[in-house]
Amino acid sequence: MDNAKESNTKRPDISAVAECFLSKTIKDIDCSTRMRNALRARDIDNMLELVLQEESNFIYLSGSGKKTIQEIKSMLKDNDLSLEMKFSNKEILYLKSLTK
């Protein structure tokens, strides 16, 4: 990484497992059709976008409910993550650079 990029990004304090998982797109993960459809309905393309979401964003989506939310939370927990995660702008830039 060059000096300009280093000053504009910051690696978040998360596990290597979480960092690896955040670099994945929705196509890359193993999940149910129900969950994949719920993520598509919210225009979520990658795991970073998912962990930034609030749980309430999924409650009233057609075709998703408690089961979908539980599946999402379980998958994220298995990868040291959760919904509604907070990252600084520099950390988000760093994580976005992993998905390209």
Image (cartoon, helix red, strand yellow):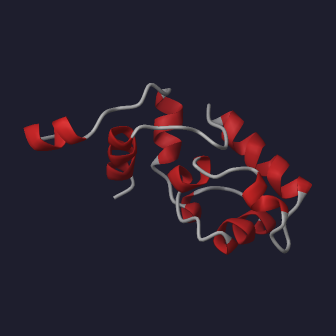
Residue drawn 27% across the image and 39% down it = 9
In the drawing, does residue 94 fall left or right of residue 23? left
Residue 45 is left or right of residue 74, and the answer is left
Residue 63 location, quadrant = bottom right
The residue positioned farthest toward the left in the image shown: 3
Please identify the quadrant where the N terminus is shown: top left
Measured as percent of width and height from the top left, residue 3 is found at 9, 37
> Left of 53 or right of it: where is 93?
left
Residue situated in front as seen by the camera: 19 or 31: 19
Residue at image x 74%, y 67%?
38
Q: Is residue 15 above or below residue 81?
A: above
> Which residue shows up at 52% across the image and 32% down it?
17
Q: Quadrant of the C terminus?
A: bottom left
Q: Position of residue 56 (x, y in %)?
A: 77, 54
Q: Relative to residue 12, is residue 17 drawn left or right?
A: right
**Total label count?**
0
The residue nearer to you, when weighing 41 against 54, is 54
Residue for point 41% across, 31% down: 12
Residue 18 image offset from top left, x and y in percent? 53, 35
Q: Is residue 89 above or below residue 53?
A: above
